[in-house]
Amino acid sequence: MRRLAVGTAFLSALLSVPAAHAQYVGRISAFVTDARSGAVMAQINPDLQRYPASLTKLMTLYMTFNALRSGQISLDQAVPVSVRAATREPSKLGLVPGSYITVEQAILGLVTKSANDAACALGELVGGDEDRFAAMMTAQAHALGMSSTTFRNASGLPNPDQVTTARDLATLGRHLINDFPEDYHYFSVPLFYFHGREIPNHNPMLRFYPGADGMKTGYTAQAGLNLVSSAARDNVRLVGVVMGARSNAERTRTMAALLDQGFQDEGVAPVSRPQVPLIIARAGSASARRQGFRMMAASGRTGNLSAASRQHLKKLGMIHYVLARAPLNRRLKVTGSHKAKAATHSTHRSKT
């Protein structure tokens, strides 16, 4: 019955007329919910239709995790990079047409850098082409109860018909956490290495909000600054959504205040938040050890690490460097054939 519902929704999405354009009027929409019970903790303009920007990638990741679970794709599978994918506007990994990345590299590119080229490549792998994938995303969204959401691409790059609401995105956040607990850890990766480059996670909540362990930022000029966050304290997990903020500071401050209030309403004792820390690397300090891990990961010499050290390296997101820097070999499953063409570079402002 569930497959029938998704199939019907997919057909409806393919045949649907363009959705109403988002009502972006320069004011914030927000929604906070208990991830387990679904209880509503706070809401501000929760059903105002908005442009999701790169929060779209949360659904791209949901579809990817679903395809991984079903065996349609695998983490080490090669993802072909088409000209369309390579020429998406920034933010991007700088993928070259005709090249390949792995599914896991693409996932990491989405959760850290919010890479539009990787998102498009994933959409083409899972859906056959990006337009079909967007229709699949919309059908899945409706099946999850996101009735006010329509997707038109895998990345969140501007499209007047690609719309959602704070309430719908909170629903998506809850489903990512509850439906794919084995994959949720990707959202907390602080950084990963790709072809010798350190790529940090854009999510500011991971760095300063106690208990925060995901999920995603988003920005376009039309959408404003968006954020979906999840944090857990004392066996209580909340999912928060803030859309349409005018600055990074307003977005982060609003999210922190709403989560604080939500935890308080759930009976969780308040936790003081640190100010921006001054970090001085000293011999033997955590920062120095972290740098040592970076150097070891960069050299590829992780095989000699103890099990505890390897686990710590993985927790920091650096174990992925070995995967990201290793050339793809013939044993990887490759689908499709793409001719290499020169990628064009956009001068548009970065979309995160």
Image (cartoon, rainbow, N blue to C red):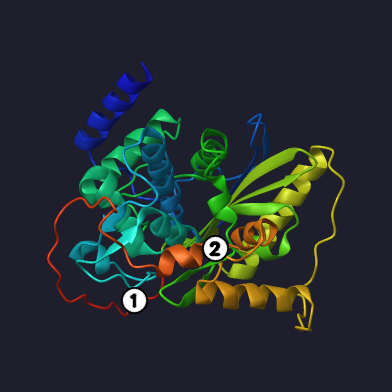
On screen, 276 above or below 310? below
Indicate which disc residue 348 carries: 1
For the residue marked with disc 2, what is the amino acid? Answer: Ile
For the residue marked with disc 1, what is the amino acid? Answer: His
265 lies left or right of 293: right
Q: Residue at x 73, y 52 (%)?
A: 211
**Neighbour class for label 1 at 10 Å: few (<14), some, many (≥20)?**
few
From the image, state whether disc 2 or disc 1 is nearer to you: 2
Which residue occupies the extreme front position in the image?
A: 304
On screen, 302 above or below 68? below
**Neighbour class for label 2 at 10 Å: few (<14), some, many (≥20)?**
many
Q: Residue at x 21, y 36 (%)?
A: 14
Q: Nearer the viewer, residue 65 or 49?
A: 65
- Point out residue 169 in the picture as x, y percentages from the top left corner: 50, 44
- Point out residue 170 in the picture as x, y percentages from the top left corner: 55, 41
Mark 1 secondary-structure assignment = loop
- Point out residue 224 in the picture as x, y percentages from the top left corner: 49, 63
Instruction: Give the quadrant of the N terminus.
Output: top left
Asked if residue 113 shows in the view, the reply is: no
Asked if residue 95 shows in the view, the reply is: yes
Gap between marks 2 and 1 measured at Cα: 33 Å
**Which residue bears the numbered disc 2?**
319
Mark 2 secondary-structure assignment = loop
Q: Nearer the viewer, residue 79 or 126?
A: 79
- Mark positioned earlier in the residue sequence (2 or 1): 2
Q: Nearer the viewer, residue 310 or 46?
A: 310
Q: Residue at x 28, y 45 (%)?
A: 126
200 lies left or right of 86: right
